[in-house]
């Protein structure tokens, strides 16, 4: 993996870059839709390529549960299994693991938990997680970390952060696939001192990229950006930074201004399935009765498969029927909006117009 | 609507034809997938065109319930509402109506029943049904008929058939859109004498096409074909004949040999959503564990979006996840099989090879 900064914002720490991987070049800042279980929910992968998606984020734990790392390895890796030629990142699944395990089964060695599918015992350690991610073969993989919940005391956050650092070293030692970039993960909850300490120590271990974990778990936006602000100055400037689980449009613009390059989030896909659509003219709740006889497209400006073919009235009808076709079309629409948003972010970095975009996005989004 | 027979089978009553409508030419024998509520379940309509679907069957009753005939009329008709440029037929929804209404609310005038959506009273008469179908604007519409359930006594079947005849006359008198072809419906349950009588009297009323209703409701295959055989000689030869609700591959070949031109059925779409796939190498139950590590396509011979892009292992994975993407891909696969089956039927009529196709289809289908 190679990362090159191609433009900088004169008014903030935002930068535009090119992430060169074995599966193509990803222009940054980039948003990765979630394909946690090997599919962008309600869509086929050939669909999401059409709306401009270049990269997706899968989840090693979910894929370990089903269909299993061996099946994917036999398929020739995750790219081949999904038939997705673009960039893939895998999260280690720490978040899921810690929500499923009993506290007594979480030790410095790792985590033991029952499979959510059939209850069989799964043992995850930094070594095992990295091995699974090596088998899956994503372009970007994540160190195995302990993700604190919110709220979390300073003492617990400090202890957890220290464990994550030990696991970062073990993850790096276990990593055994030079075609993949292993990112270190910064933790420390909402405590800037811990965040700074975590960033500094993770950077000392040394990774080709870094992710900020344990954000967007219930803390305030102010707390989240205080954590981001505490982390970024401590990380090497020249490598990509990923803000895990963040994807509200305004938050992404803010994070880009802090120097973040990569995002992943369920926001566009989950909101679409719940009928909340983003357009450059404002958000739409398609379930609303006002759309029953509205024969305009979701957005006149959008070139997605939903907007170029179907009316709000028809999509409202399909949504009320709880039709899978509605979930797919609405998901493709939101993914198109997100792809266009990221493109605008990238274009406004060299011209210093990120503030203009921020104003526009504030006016059209409800959250 | 114009119908022309272009080829005949020398060994049976099968014929190939061209049905010319305001929305294109439909080559017959043709299979219409169900788009009862204005969508082929789990698919978008632009999808089904890709796999060779030229016509769909919608349901006037379902669309009356939601979104309502007025909304569709305001959209410019069902073709515009669905953005489907091809042929559409609408069933009157008699079958649904009679299963939802209390017996005391079924009179010679019509049927009163509560809306399955919100309980409000719906009054359906031959006049009201035809008016709704005129508003929807499908190319082929159906007279309002009483559909008997199975089993049904000869006495009840005779009474119901007589009512259907009276309703056929009223449907014809009410029909008020020359761009649409109104088909008469033959009833008479499993009684060949009643079927013959119904066909003869419906033909006397005179329609540009005929449908055989009240079949595939639980009777044996032998009973069904006895009914079909009793009906067809009594109907004018030169017009299209539709066998309502039939779609098992072998039954369609058999019905074509009797002289049937049009079919509609949930078989390919519902079976796909339940994981039963048709291929020219045999049927596949994709949920079966044997497909977990099977990286071949469903069928090497198929050019559908599922077969050209994804493996059995991946489709098995999506199906086990109960992913909407699986339902869509598998539905598109089955619809492609059905489109290819009908194409083969049409090609084998002039060459007299329908028996060969029958042998092949017996060997690859389980039902």
Image (spheres, coloured by chain):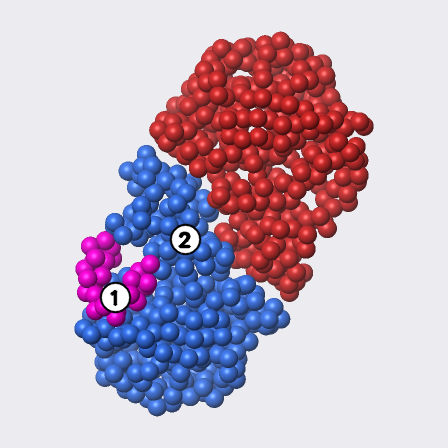
Chain colours: A blue, B red
Q: Secondary structure at mark 2?
A: helix
In the image, taking residue A351 as reference, residue B331 lies left or right, namely right
Q: Which residues are magenta?
A: A340-367
In the image, taking residue B349 as reference, residue B60 lies left or right, namely left
Closer to us: A322 or B240:
B240
Closer to us: A189 or A291:
A291
**Residue B133 in the image: above or below residue A192:** above
Residue B310: give its label.
Answer: none
Residue A348: give its label.
Answer: 1
Give residue B56's position: percent from left, percent from top: 54, 34
Residue under mark 2: which chain is it in?
A: A
Closer to us: B112 or A265:
A265
Give residue B287's position: percent from left, percent from top: 62, 55
Identify which residue is drawn at 62% across, 32% down: B27
Residue bearing mark 2? A332
First reached walking from the N terminus: tag 1 or tag 2: 2
């Amino acid at each position: 993996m190679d990362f090159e900064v191609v433009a900088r914002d004169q008014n903030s720490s935002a930068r535009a870059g090119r992430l060169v991987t074995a599966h193509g070049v990803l222009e940054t800042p980039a948003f990765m839709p979630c394909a946690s279980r090997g599919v962008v929910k309600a869509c086929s992968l050939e669909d999401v390529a059409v709306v401009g998606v270049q990269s997706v984020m899968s989840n090693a734990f979910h894929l370990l549960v089903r269909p299993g790392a061996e099946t994917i390895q036999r398929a020739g890796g995750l790219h081949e299994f999904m038939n997705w030629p673009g960039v893939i990142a895998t999260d280690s699944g720490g978040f899921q693991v810690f929500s499923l395990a009993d506290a007594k089964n979480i030790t410095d060695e790792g985590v033991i938990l029952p499979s959510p599918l059939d209850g069989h015992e799964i043992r995850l350690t930094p070594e095992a997680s990295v091995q699974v991610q090596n088998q899956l073969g994503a372009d970007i993989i994540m160190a195995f970390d302990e993700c604190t919940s919110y709220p979390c005391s300073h003492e617990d956050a400090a202890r957890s952060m220290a464990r994550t650092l030990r696991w970062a070293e073990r993850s790096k030692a276990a990593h055994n696939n030079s075609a993949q970039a292993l990112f270190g993960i910064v933790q420390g909850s909402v405590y800037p001192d811990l965040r700074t300490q975590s960033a500094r120590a993770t950077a000392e271990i040394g990774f080709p990229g870094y992710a900020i974990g344990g954000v967007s778990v219930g803390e305030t936006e102010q707390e989240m950006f205080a954590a981001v602000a505490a982390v970024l100055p401590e990380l090497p400037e020249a490598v990509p930074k990923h803000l895990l689980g963040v994807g509200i449009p305004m938050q992404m613009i803010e994070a880009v201004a802090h120097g973040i390059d990569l995002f992943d989030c369920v926001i566009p896909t989950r909101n679409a399935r719940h009928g909340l659509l983003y357009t450059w003219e404002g958000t739409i709740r398609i379930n609303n009765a006002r759309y029953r006889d509205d024969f305009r497209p979701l957005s006149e400006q959008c070139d997605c498969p939903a907007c170029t073919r179907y009316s709000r009235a028809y999509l409202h009808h399909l949504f009320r029927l709880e039709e899978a076709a509605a979930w797919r079309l609405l998901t493709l629409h939101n993914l198109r909006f997100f792809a266009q948003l990221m493109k605008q972010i990238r274009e406004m970095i060299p011209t210093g117009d990120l503030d203009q975009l921020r104003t526009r996005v504030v006016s059209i989004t409800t959250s």
